[in-house]
Image (spheres, rainbow, N blue to C red):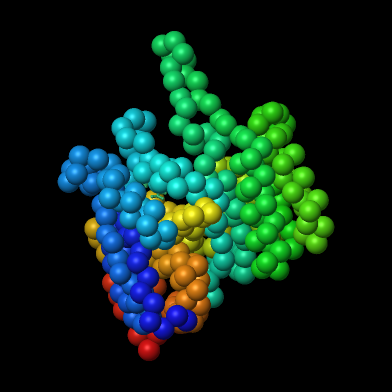
Amino acid sequence: MSEAKTHKITLIPGDGIGPEVTQAVLRILEATGVKFEWERFAAGAEAFEIHGEYIPAALYESIARNRVALKGPVTTPIGGGFKSINVTLRKKFDLFANFRPVRALPGLETKWPGVDLIIVRENTEGEYVGLEHEVVPGVVESIKVISEKGSTRIARFAFEYARKHGRKKIHSIHKANIMKLSDGLFLRCARAVSEEFPDIQYGEHLIDNTCMQLVMNPFQYDTLLLENLYGDIVSDLCAGLVGGLGLVPGANLGTECAIFEAVHGSAPDIAGKNLANPTALLQSAILMLRHLDESTAADKVQKALETIYSERKTLTRDVGGAAGTTQFADAVLSAMG
Ligand code: NAI
């Protein structure tokens, strides 16, 4: 641990349950002893009200300068309105790899105890390029972009991660029977990269079959490599395997910057009620600590989190407990000693 270093981090609490889970996570991070200086920003509808911009210029500058951000969820209007803040930030900073480890926590009763999957989602292309237009009234075209460069670099990210962390198997998940050109290119790139990694098993499954296989027997998979939209959907499915969206963390990684955020959204149904589970953002913060080379602090928080789940005394409602967001954070803090 770098004793004296202060980490300047851009902080986007977000909206909905974002501010609640962010507050819980900040209290825990401050108790690790690691020094942080937070540069806090609103984004989305809240930022528009204050600054007249959905993403203030100062927020872009802060991320570019600090190179690390911790972000809560931001609501995206459905079927119209402003563009997703999340997608915009990922594209702006070329955060091409969305890394989502899906691991069962001890003590939680789930259909499949012991699930341990890595999801690697391409984060800048596919249907998320935002190219949609009305051709004639009643007909809309939406363009999916898959490039050789984008597919190759995400495949290389997955294989390099697998080799470095002792993962054994990667499956590319696709729909190349229908999207012959786009998913076909994605597969060709993944296959070419796989040849450089003979130590990692490589397989390919259709996305529809994969969803069924994951529900029936997730243990047949290790690391899943997916295009943007497939990765988005399969992440939520996999969250369901380990106890829900309140648990699963994520990191948006590029060559320059990284934004750490949970898989879940702003959960308007439970916002402002002290009901949200901060575990997903906390586990994202643990990924951030490791990224910052603060592994002692990361281990400390991880251990406390696992203690709370093993004891099952202070869990939030989504995983069968009765504790609120703040009580859960209190429990993690006291387990940290
Ligand atoms: P959601 O992930 O917000 O909620 C889905 C379900 O999971 C809800 O029942 C919610 O209560 C529950 N849930 C989510 N997080 C939880 C937590 N930490 N603790 C306990 N329960 C939790 O997905 P939804 O409702 O489809 O989307 C809501 C909004 O969030 C939309 O505007 C969407 O665009 C946005 N969103 C933002 C993301 C981001 O900022 N990265 C990611 C996904 C969605």
Image side of residue 23 versus residue 208, left or right: left
The residue nearer to you, when weighing 226 against 219, is 226
Identified at 47% across, 19% down, the residue is 140
Above/below status of 164 relative to 227: below
Identified at 60% across, 53% down, the residue is 120
- Residue 235 visible in image: no
The residue nearer to you, when weighing 256 against 28, is 256
Above/below status of 66 relative to 131: below
The residue at the far left in this view is 50
Q: Position of residue 15 (x, y in %)?
A: 28, 52
Q: Position of residue 233 (x, y in %)?
A: 53, 45
- Residue 39 visible in image: yes
Q: Position of residue 29 (x, y in %)?
A: 36, 74
Identified at 46% across, 13% down, the residue is 135
Residue 62 occupies quadrant: bottom left
The residue nearer to you, when weighing 61 against 281, is 61
Image side of residue 287 versus residue 204, left or right: left
Residue 138 occupies quadrant: top left
Image side of residue 131 versus residue 218, left or right: left
Q: Position of residue 231 (x, y in %)?
A: 57, 46
The residue at the far top in this view is 136
Query: Could you tell me which quadrant the C terminus lies in?
Result: bottom left
Residue 159 occupies quadrant: bottom right
Identified at 50% across, 25% down, the residue is 142
